[in-house]
Image (cartoon, rainbow, N blue to C red):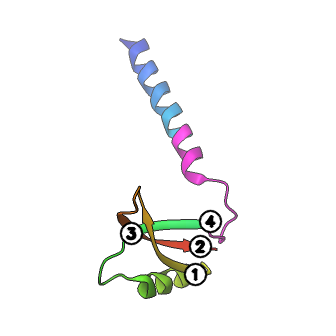
Amino acid sequence: MESSKMLVVFTLMVLIAVSSVLVSGNFASGEASSQLCFNPCTPQLGSTECNTICVNKKYKEGSCIGFGIPPTFNYCCCKN
């Protein structure tokens, strides 16, 4: 019983350590990654609105980009 509790605690600690390394990434603080894609583009969220959001997030530009083969889904993508 005691060893099973220790095994569970050890496993949880390993999972927390691994997930914190994966989430932290290797970006310099305050510096945006080279590309970020998020919300699907809609009639309300077009390329102009996407560009405004991206510039506010300290990216150089943003636009709606199609994904899929053929491109059927458009997402707002910000670029450095």
**Residue located at (35% from left, 11% from top):** 1
Choose the circle earlier in sequence order: 1 or 4: 4
Q: CA distance from mark 1 to mark 3?
A: 16 Å
Compared to residue 9, the image places residue 17 above or below, namely: below
Q: Foreground: 32 or 35?
A: 35
Residue 43, quarter of the rendered image: bottom left
Instruction: Name the residue at 39% across, 20% down.
Output: 5
Q: Nearer the viewer, mark 2 or mark 3?
A: 3
- Among numbered discs 2 and 1, the one appearing first in the sequence: 1
Q: Tag 3: Cα neighbours inside 10 Å, few (<14), some, or many (≥20)?
A: some
Provide the secondary structure element on which disc 1 rests: strand
Residue behind mark 3: 74
**Residue range highlighted in magenta:** 18-34
Return the x and y of residue 67 as percentages of the image width and height.
Answer: 43, 61
Spatial separation of the CA atoms under disc 2 and disc 3: 15 Å
Looking at the image, which residue sits at the far front?
A: 70
Quarter of the figure with residue 27: bottom right
Residue 22 pos. (x, y %): 56, 46
Q: Amino acid at mark 3?
A: Asn
Q: CA distance from mark 4 to mark 3?
A: 20 Å
Q: Is residue 65 above or below residue 21?
A: below
> Residue most toward the left?
43
> Which amino acid does the dot numbered 1 rest on?
Glu
- Give whichever of discs 2 and 4 has the lower sequence position: 4
- Asked if disc 4 and disc 3 are in contact, CB closer than 8 Å, the reply is no
Mark 1 or mark 3, which is nearer to you? 3
Label whose residue precedes the other's in the sequence (4 or 3): 4
Q: Which residue is mark 4?
A: 33
